[in-house]
Image (tube, helix red, strand yellow):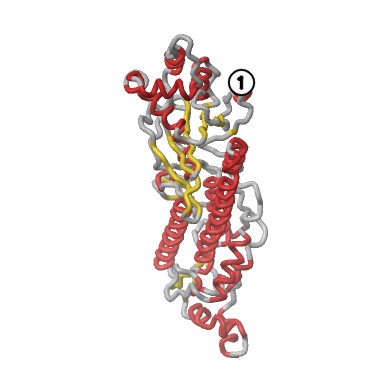
Amino acid sequence: MIKLAVVGHTNVGKTSLLRTLIRDTGFGEVSHRPSTTRHVEGARLSVNGVALLELYDTPGLEDAITLLDYLENLEHPGERLDGPARLERFLQGSEARQRFEQEAKVLRQLLASDAGLYVIDAREPVLAKYRDELEVLAGCGKPLLPVLNFVASSDHREADWREALARLGLHALVRFDSVAPPQDGEQRLYESLALLLEGSRASLQTLLDDQQAQRLARRQTAAHLIAELLLDCAACRRSVVSEPGPTAAAIAELHQAVRQREQRCVEALLKLYAFRLQDASASDLPLLDGRWGDDLFNPETLKQLGVRVGGGIAAGAAAGAGVDLLVGGLTLGAAALAGALAGGALQTARSYGGRLLGKLKGQRELTVDDHVLRLLALRQRQLLDALERRGHAAQDSIKVAAPQDKSWREGKLPEALSKARAHPQWSSLNPRSRLSQAERQEQLQALAAEL
């Protein structure tokens, strides 16, 4: 098992880096206050039950300048100690338990590890205290890999840090951002470590392969969750008497059912990506108190996401549900319905006889409008993209970007959703649902693949 000490100045994002690497928003304590981490804390990464990597969060170095001066005066006259020997003498002395207690914790852990990740806040200027820190840490005789943190910030000083590290003989480094990690950030970090720890290359590659497999599995599971939501809503329907009072009540109930179903999908996605519900509690998502802030059935929301709507917007999305008497929105007069039923030969009458009889009895069927289905797909894909780009050290609420592709904003909806219109038993929002039907599962897989 590889042991890595995560070291660096106080308040540069060491704990934040570990949170992102182990995907745990609750690891350690993250704060803007200096010296938040006071003790060494460890986390382990395993593959198939085999521990491959142990990461140790350490306190921040606070007074490396004074410590370096102290170390230089430890040698006796005529004595020439190497770095580890000089540090061992320091750690056995009283100053390691008093004035330099925090620094001693860091050095003990680095000496007991195979290598160290030296975390740098790339927004900070290169100061003398950082050079002294690196000189003290180099005395441990362990490979050090500098990690430039917060490089996604517009005010980073990456070029200055690269030059300063090169002057100290540290040419291998990794760009990272614990709040918004690059897609290949972990891969680059572990590949760089493999160059420093040649004997551990196989273990690091195993870890990389496992993380890639987990990333793909998360994406596939997320697509399945969104497909379930869309299929549930496409197949959902409510039969209601064609009178203003009952119709309004049925539309309101359908609104609520769809909103709650979407919220369950949001919560499932947050759990899948190991984020907390409160990470999505602001209008930026746009979520408000854990629910979508911009109303799903507001035509203005459709316009904001660029969903192209036709003349039926007032009766469709604005009302919150399309009135669909037959699959595809086809409407037939009462005489045509009566003729279809009386003839008994029309396939439509056999398939939808109950619905046609309901029409003759003055009933109407409410279904979720196509535009609302588009909006559901867009919102969930926005959330998914935001989760895949978010680090587990992020403290702000989740921000989503406007979707760039037009696949859900215009054109035909996927065939699976059209088929779902004809199968109310496919929706968990309907009574007497049959979710395990083979054809439903087939369409669900097709829709997830398309997503």
418 lies above or below 385: below
At mark 1, the secondary structure is helix
Q: Residue furthest top?
A: 77
| Left or right placement of residue 402 versus residue 281 in this view | right
Inspect the image, locate mark 1, and give the three-letter code of the amino acid beneath it. Answer: Asp
What is the x, y in percent for residue 430? 44, 71
Q: Residue furthest front?
A: 78
Q: Residues within 10 Å of mark 1 (few under 14, many from 20)?
A: few
Which one is in front, 65 or 104?
Answer: 104
40 lies above or below 266: above
Residue that badge 1 annotates: 160
Which one is in front, 127 or 208?
Answer: 208
Which one is in front, 266 or 346?
Answer: 266
What is the x, y in percent for residue 205? 59, 47
Instruction: Answer with the quarter of the image where residue 213 lies.
Output: bottom right
| Left or right placement of residue 201 versus residue 290 in this view | right
| Left or right placement of residue 84 versus residue 157 in this view | left
What is the x, y in percent for residue 206? 57, 50
Task: Give the quadrant of the C terminus.
Answer: bottom right
Is residue 403 something that shows in the picture?
A: yes
